[in-house]
Amino acid sequence: MTELQRLKGLLPPEMQSWVFVEAAAAADPPLITIEEIGRDEVEIQLDLEAWEALALDQRNLLFWHEVGRIQNDAVPRDGWEMAALAIGLGGAIGELWVQDGLLLLLALGLSSFAGYRLYMKNNPEKHLQEAIAADERAIALASRFGYSLPNAYRSLGSALKTLVAQTRKKRKRSFYENRLDALRRSAAKAQAEMARSEGSPEAMSSENVYG
């Protein structure tokens, strides 16, 4: 079984007919990413050389993170915002020439709305919150596929720590570090809930998510 086939088997059954797993074809691709490829179809793309250098459990949890993004409807999509911004700005310039106040206001309104949508779409805080939500989904999926809760947290924490060590760009490294901090808080909360429900603490301290 190839790695792509193995990962396909890690998809929830309800997603296997419309989510595809493929090797990335681009030059210098990201480790793993998702892309909408058609109506109701999504592709998970991998840099297989870098991917297979990771430990198996790290790969599994990073893969489930992307699955979690799909489940949360956080798939990047080609939007209309850039086209609308260009049309609005072009229209505003044209209306300045012909001096039609109403059409100028409409063009400026379209540009402003498109610009706001672009800002929200590329907002770093929004991206971080989406990633944290997908990490929670990944933990749940790991449990669904037979991982104990402590091992799921440890595996994802170890994977994120590895990405921090491998990432040179400060902004991207900070993004992974913030996800690690959120994962540590989530692990501490899960540990407290397990202790309350079972009457004894599970061996899963918040530091253990770092692997």
Image (cartoon, rainbow, N blue to C red):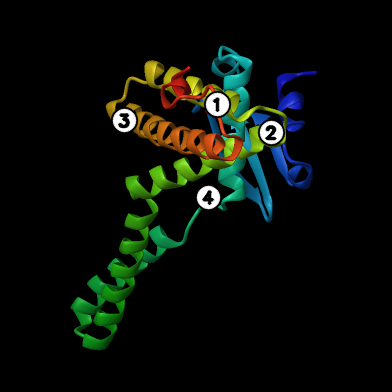
Q: Which residue is mark 1?
A: 202
- Asked whether the residues under the numbered discs 4 and 2 touch, taking CB atoms below 8 Å apart as contact, a structural biologist would say no
- N-term-proximal mark, 1 vs 4: 4
- N-term-proximal mark, 1 vs 3: 3
Q: Nearer the viewer, mark 1 or mark 2?
A: 1
Q: Nearer the viewer, mark 3 or mark 2?
A: 3
- Asked whether the residues under the numbered discs 1 and 2 touch, taking CB atoms below 8 Å apart as contact, a structural biologist would say no
Between marks 3 and 2, how big is the CA–CA gap? Answer: 28 Å
Q: Which residue is mark 4?
A: 74
Q: Nearer the viewer, mark 1 or mark 4?
A: 1
> Residue 125: x, y in percent?
33, 47
Inspect the image, locate mark 1, and give the three-letter code of the amino acid beneath it: Glu
Q: Which residue is mark 3?
A: 174
- N-term-proximal mark, 3 vs 2: 2
State the SS at label 2.
strand
- The residue sitting at 63% across, 17% down in the picture is 56
- Asked whether the residues under the numbered discs 3 and 2 touch, taking CB atoms below 8 Å apart as contact, a structural biologist would say no
